[in-house]
Image (tube, helix red, strand yellow):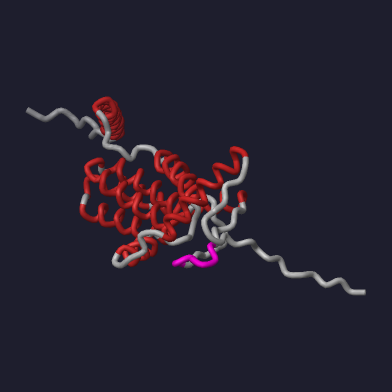
Amino acid sequence: MRRVRLPIVRRRTVGPPIRKPGLIGFVGWLDQSALWLLRTRGHREPVESAMRTLGVAGEWAAIWVTIGLAGAASDPRRRSRWLAATGVGPAAIGVNYAVKVVVGRDRPLIEEHPPLARAPSKLSFPSAHATSSVAAATALGRVAPERRGLVYFLAAAICLTRPYLGMHYPSDVIAGVFLGALLGRAIPRLEEPGIEERLIDLVASGAKRQHEASVNGARDRGAEAQVPRPAAGPPASQ
């Protein structure tokens, strides 16, 4: 007799979360309660439209790539560092997905309040928006400290959209923030060189010029030595 398998029914969150016993239950209750509040409170226009727009801007780190390229185009002196920081956001998404696959946590589901956006996968932990935004903001802020407040404010706003739109648990966002901060600090030499670094570079460049000058001088002396001299002729008659 053939066995019939029933479809797997995923449990959905209905109503405010119920606190479970124990420390893990308490932490889970806090996480779900924060999600419930953000998903069910403050959903008025134009706030909700603004949150949707920020969520779209943060997809695939698009807004961070745009900021990085604009900085590279308008700031030739720091162009190479702007371009290096531009790639941090997309790279962070790749790292984030690898962690997602390992953890395997599903996205939250609230039956009477479905998500207000779409995602390329059902994996939730950690948030790719949070990881890429904080990583990019950290890297770009290292390149341009005078704009650090603005990029961090934008990153915080994008992080807030994730539970607000019902796409992530707050714990997904917190994990993404920590991962993004680590990735944003991992790229070397994005800051403005300090006095010590400038002195080291100055000494190194001076030594390099001196070495090149000595090599060129030796090459010139060798070339002169290889030039044939005219043979001495008979003495001139008086």
The residue range painted magenta reads: 110-117
> x and y percent of residue 229 in the render?
24, 33
Towards the viewer: 126 or 141 = 126
Towards the viewer: 104 or 94 = 104
Which quarter of the image is occupied by the C terminus? top left
- Left/right placement of residue 134 relative to residue 17 reads left
112 inside magenta stretch: yes
Look at the magenta stretch and give its main secondary structure: loop
- Left/right placement of residue 233 relative to residue 160 reads left
> x and y percent of residue 108 in the render?
54, 58
> x and y percent of residue 199 in the render?
25, 26
Residue at the image point whose x is 47% and y is 60% from the top: 166
Residue 8's image quarter?
bottom right
- Is residue 26 shown to the viewer in this render? yes
- Left/right placement of residue 73 relative to residue 181 reads left
Query: In the rendered view, would you say 158 is above or below 182?
Result: below
